[in-house]
Amino acid sequence: MRKLLLGAFIMFIIWGVTPALAQVPVQSGPSLSFKRGIGITAPDSAFSLNLRFRIQNRAIYYTDPQPSLSQADSDFELRVRRLRLRLEGFMLSPKLTYLVQLSFSRGDMDWSMRDNSAINTSPNVVRDAVIYYRPTPQLQLFFGQTKLPGNRQRVISSGDQQFVDRSIVNVAFNIDRDFGFQAHYTNHVGGFYYMIKSALTSGEGRNVITTNKGLAYTGRLELLPLGKFTNEGDYFEGDLEREEQVKLSLAGGLSHNRKARRAGGQIGRDLYEERDLRTYIFDGLLKYRGFAVYAEHLARSTDNPFTLNASGDSRHIITGNGQNFQVSYLFKNNLELASRYARVTPAAAIRAVERQEETYVAGVTKYLRRHRVKLQANVSYITFTHKPTNSNSNTWGAALQFELGI
């Protein structure tokens, strides 16, 4: 009898609750997108998450400093150059967005034991951790750690390059990533577009433990007199869009890093003394029907490039200037031929300890899925001029890289 009454009670509860449940709206599941990686948007549109990854596997052969590729005295580089995980999306509103990018390969953490760094003592996994807010369509505000508005080649993702590596000019003088505030403003007068980018940051680089009283001030102006590039083509290398009309971008910028504690400001070995660094940036890009031409000029100065510790040991800042020129053509079968010439000229104050360097690079890239899946091969010739003797040494190199990502 007790079991019968219990069963009747349970059936009564189910009978009474069922009509109420029928009135509760059932939310649909999250929406999915596969346009750029794997995208998920919450059913109530409270947030979204887009997940992407990419791998760069490479093999490089180079002589040091032999005159030709046939010499036996050579070195090999076989490794995972980059392994990245990228997460981005919006929170609460499409106006409030975020970007998180992590790096996992040993060579992608911008950290070396020889630096004996007091600023950052561990491998750097976090590359980007930044929050964006767009109050108007023209203005975007940043807070967090990400790339500074520096030279175009540094701001272009390493996954969107047409050569295996960025140029030696970028290596010597780029201002890299930093933590702080940025504001980007875009507008136009008719078909003439312009972009104003500014940043107020710590000046210490990414993932630092401590900061000093010096800050970094960065500004950049970009002019697009012939209109916008298709699909933001001014921020990936090679004319993959095969622009039907000539597109041109001209840009200039300045970064002043006060009381810098590292040789490159945001990157490089620790200095023994603080220095104010000034970096000057000029670059231009032209694309038309598969052709792409890129040029940049970078320069860095400081009042005294040498720093000393109590024992008399010296560490210096690379000052001087550099130029990089790239020309490429993309065939209709997505095979691209490209060439590069780059030169770094040290300032007179450091020529006793730094060499002038020039590189000549020829490259071929087969784009299988634009920049996301591609096979690249480069041959390079590097010459070093030792001042003041003007003696030379040369190095040949050959590289093969496969990039795969979503």
Image (tube, rainbow, N blue to C red):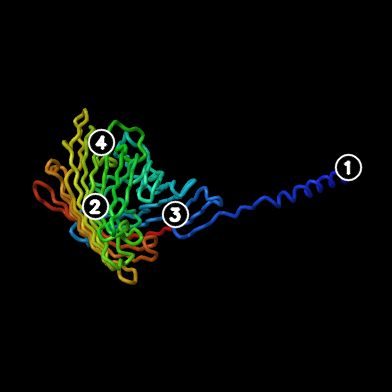
| Few, some or many residues within 10 Å of mark 1 (<14, 14–19, 20+) | few
State the residue in front, 138 or 221. 138
Horizontal and vertical percent for residue 203? 29, 38
Q: Looking at the picture, which amino acid does disc 4 mark?
A: Ala
Mark found first going from the N terminus, 3 or 1: 1
Residue shown at 19% from the left, 56% from the top: 66
Residue 32 placement, left or right of 376: right
In which quadrant of the rendered view does residue 158 lie? bottom left
Q: Quadrant of the C terminus?
A: bottom left
Q: Amino acid at mark 3?
A: Arg
N-terminal of the pair, mark 4 or mark 3, is 3
User: Measured along the vertical axis of the image, is residue 273 above or below residue 59?
Assistant: above
> For the residue labelled by badge 4, is the local secondary structure a helix, a strand or a loop?
strand
* Residue matched to label 1: 2
**Residue of label 2:** 251
Looking at the image, tell me whether mark 2 or mark 1 is earlier in sequence order. 1
Tell me how far mark 4 sits from mark 1, CA to CA: 82 Å
Residue 3 placement, left or right of 333? right
Q: Outermost residue toward the top?
A: 310
Hey, what amino acid is under mark 1?
Arg
Residue 247 placed where, x, y %? Answer: 27, 62
Q: Give the labeled residue for mark 3.
A: 52
Which quadrant of the structure image shows residue 233? bottom left
- Residue type at mark 2? Ala
Q: CA distance from mark 3 to mark 1?
A: 60 Å
Residue 260: assigned label: 4
